[in-house]
């Protein structure tokens, strides 16, 4: 049985029963069955879209997912539109279904069973409440051009991914366990696509970076050889909390069923349409990762706060990690006078998100932070850059410094640290929010790693250079554990890693590449002292 199949500009003959090499036909035999893909029209690669790897339990959609069963027939991997329930950020609409645990695989034509290529797995950000893996945002062509396989995965969000009851039914961190399920699927099957199972790198931005970090701390097996963290680590204050069963009661009450019994609430919530759950959840609170209780026969992901933990997994592991030079500027751009007048509580609010201060200590600590950033000034729009620095330092920059210190302590091998500071035509979030001031904001680097397909237009030449540099360095790291293995015309600077006792190098990624040392060293030294002074107040800190 053969069928004609229109792909791109030609016809490809695909025959059942004949398994062609993925080099020619995008038809692959995996451990879970036959998967048929598509030939890309924008490069020399194949696409396998929307492969289901996990099943959400219909009777308890807030609980752990299970592996997707084997395919009985050839799975046609043509559709990357699956999206987990959320209010997506582009049209601000309620979308998604629980049949969303899908992944996409992009395979360069150079990958074969004789020539296995390294694999990069992308975990999206979006505050654990939004995000999806499809090409609409995460187009693969620039990364795959560098002869690596790119895999992008979905995971559940909001209450479906992160309801945390502290019970065996809903232990918490279901979204992280979805990611784990995807990583297991990739480990089991990527060789069939020409991937090198010994060279898997996981990479994430923002909540995706936090996720990558949590995979390093997790109790489960290591399914990768190196990691990339962009603007997000587990030290972001407030990342982990104790279980919050009360959120499920509140959610239930919002939807018309009042109870103080968590399991009754859960049964009720499981019967409600996911879109209603999502709409209601946004008025309750955020659903984020939590510290799990341990139960027999239940897989746990994380049971303590990273501040108390060693990370044996990073031993000898290469790490690429960094942040953008103006992470939080979009928070302050285009704000009116009233916003700043109402903003006086920001220092205390931030400190409370990461420390358990008593009232007196909080007042004192707030004063230190205030004096350090703004002296005796009143908060007005004129201070927007320095306020943005404060938020960036607290949420991203200093947490990255803390993470790096912990990696060094646990003997990671080479830590490639960067600051992305380029301001061009593809700065993702600034462009989306119509912000022109400042350097690079949170998530701006996305536009220089991915082919953001809804933008349609071709990159300008100067932006293309940054794109080529970023994707080449990232792919080099995936391939060689070194972003600049040799000096080239494209990459004229050697990016030196941080190691125990070495200078604190970082690569400034702007119109030019520059090897520098210790970004924002005054601000980071302030927070280093601050954390040392207040160690015992850090959320979750335990004395032994
Ligand atoms: C947003 O709406 C446009 C126009 O209807 C559509 O093409 C696009 O896919 C939507 N984006 C998302 C992420 O749903
Ligand atoms: C973006 O901002 C500029 C100037 O601040 C304004 O002229 C333009 O209309 C804005 N565009 C959008 C889409 O909001």
Image (tube, rainbow, N blue to C red):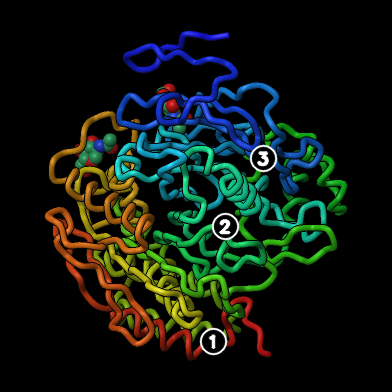
Which quadrant of the figure contains the N terminus? top right
Vertically, is 301 above or below 84?
Answer: below
Q: Is residue 426 above or below residue 165?
A: above
Task: Name above or below for residue 240 compared with residue 2.
Answer: below
Q: In front: 357, or 401?
A: 401
Residue 143, horizontal then vertical, whole percent: 33, 44
Mark 1 or 3: in front is: 3
Q: What mark, if any, has residue 54 been given in the picture?
A: 3
Instruction: Name the residue rendered at 67%, 61% in the picture.
Output: 301
Q: Quadrant of the C terminus?
A: bottom right
Residue drawn at 47 percent across, 79 percent down:
411
Relative to 76, is 5 on the left or the right?
left
Q: Residues under labels 2 and 3: Cα distance?
A: 17 Å
Location of residue 474 (image quadrant): bottom left
Label 2 CB, ligand 1: below 8 Å? no
Q: In the rendered structure, which disc, 1 or 3, sits on the residue that comes first in sequence?
A: 3
Residue 61 got which mark?
none
Which picture quadrant has residue 418? bottom left
The total number of labels drawn is 3
Mark 2 vs mark 3: in front: 2
Task: Indicate the position of residue 507 as horizontal and vertical percent values.
Answer: 25, 67
Q: Which mark is residue 223?
A: 2
List the residue tagged with mark 1: 535
């Amino acid at each position: 049985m053969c069928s004609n199949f229109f792909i791109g500009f030609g016809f490809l003959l695909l025959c059942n029963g004949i398994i062609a090499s993925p080099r020619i036909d995008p038809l692959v035999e995996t451990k879970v069955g036959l998967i048929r893909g598509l030939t890309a029209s924008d490069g020399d690669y194949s696409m396998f879209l929307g492969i289901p790897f996990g099943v959400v339990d219909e009777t308890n959609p807030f609980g752990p997912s299970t592996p997707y069963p084997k395919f009985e027939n050839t799975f046609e991997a043509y559709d990357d539109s699956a999206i987990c329930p959320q209010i997506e950020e582009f049209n601000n609409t309620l979308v998604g279904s629980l049949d969303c645990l899908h992944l996409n695989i992009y395979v360069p034509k150079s990958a074969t069973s004789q020539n296995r290529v390294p694999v990069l797995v992308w975990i999206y950000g979006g505050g654990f409440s939004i995000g999806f893996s499809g090409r609409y945002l995460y187009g693969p062509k620039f990364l795959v051009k560098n002869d690596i396989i790119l895999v992008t995965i979905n995971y559940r969000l909001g209450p479906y991914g992160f309801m945390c009851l502290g019970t065996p039914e809903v232990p918490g961190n279901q979204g992280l366990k979805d990611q784990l399920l995807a990583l297991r699927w990739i480990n089991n099957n990527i060789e069939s696509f020409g991937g090198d199972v010994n060279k898997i790198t996981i990479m994430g931005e923002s909540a995706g970076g936090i996720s990558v970090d949590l995979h390093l701390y997790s109790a489960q097996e290591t399914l990768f050889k190196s990691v990339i963290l962009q603007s997000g680590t587990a030290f972001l204050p407030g990342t982990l909390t104790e279980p919050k069963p009360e959120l499920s009661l509140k959610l239930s009450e919002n939807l018309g069923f009042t109870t103080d019994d968590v399991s009754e609430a859960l049964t009720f919530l499981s019967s409600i349409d996911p879109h209603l759950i999502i709409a209601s959840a946004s008025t309750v609170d955020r659903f984020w990762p939590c510290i799990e209780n341990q139960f027999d026969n239940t897989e746990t992901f994380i049971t303590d706060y990273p501040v108390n933990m060693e990370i044996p997994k990073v031993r000898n592991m290469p790490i690429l990690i960094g942040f953008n030079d103006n992470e939080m500027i979009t928070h302050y751009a285009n704000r009116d006078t009233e916003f700043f007048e109402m903003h006086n509580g920001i220092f205390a609010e931030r400190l409370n998100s990461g420390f358990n201060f008593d009232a007196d200590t909080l007042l004192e600590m707030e004063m230190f932070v205030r004096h350090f950033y703004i002296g005796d000034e009143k908060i007005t729009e004129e201070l927007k850059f320095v306020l943005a620095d404060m938020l960036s330092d607290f949420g991203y920059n200093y947490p990255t410094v803390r993470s790096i210190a912990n990696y060094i302590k646990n003997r990671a091998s080479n830590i490639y640290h960067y600051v992305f500071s380029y301001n061009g035509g593809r700065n993702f979030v600034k462009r989306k929010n119509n912000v022109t001031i400042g350097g690079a904001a949170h998530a701006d680097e996305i536009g220089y790693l991915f082919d953001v397909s809804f933008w349609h237009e071709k990159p300008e030449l100067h932006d293309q250079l940054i794109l080529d540099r970023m994707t080449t360095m990232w792919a080099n790291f995936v391939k060689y554990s070194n972003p600049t293995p040799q000096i080239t015309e494209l990459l004229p600077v050697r990016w030196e890693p941080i190691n125990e006792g070495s200078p604190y190098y970082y690569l400034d990624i702007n119109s030019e590449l520059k090897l520098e040392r210790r970004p924002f060293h005054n601000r980071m030294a302030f927070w280093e002292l601050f954390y040392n002074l207040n160690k015992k107040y850090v959320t979750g800190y335990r004395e032994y």
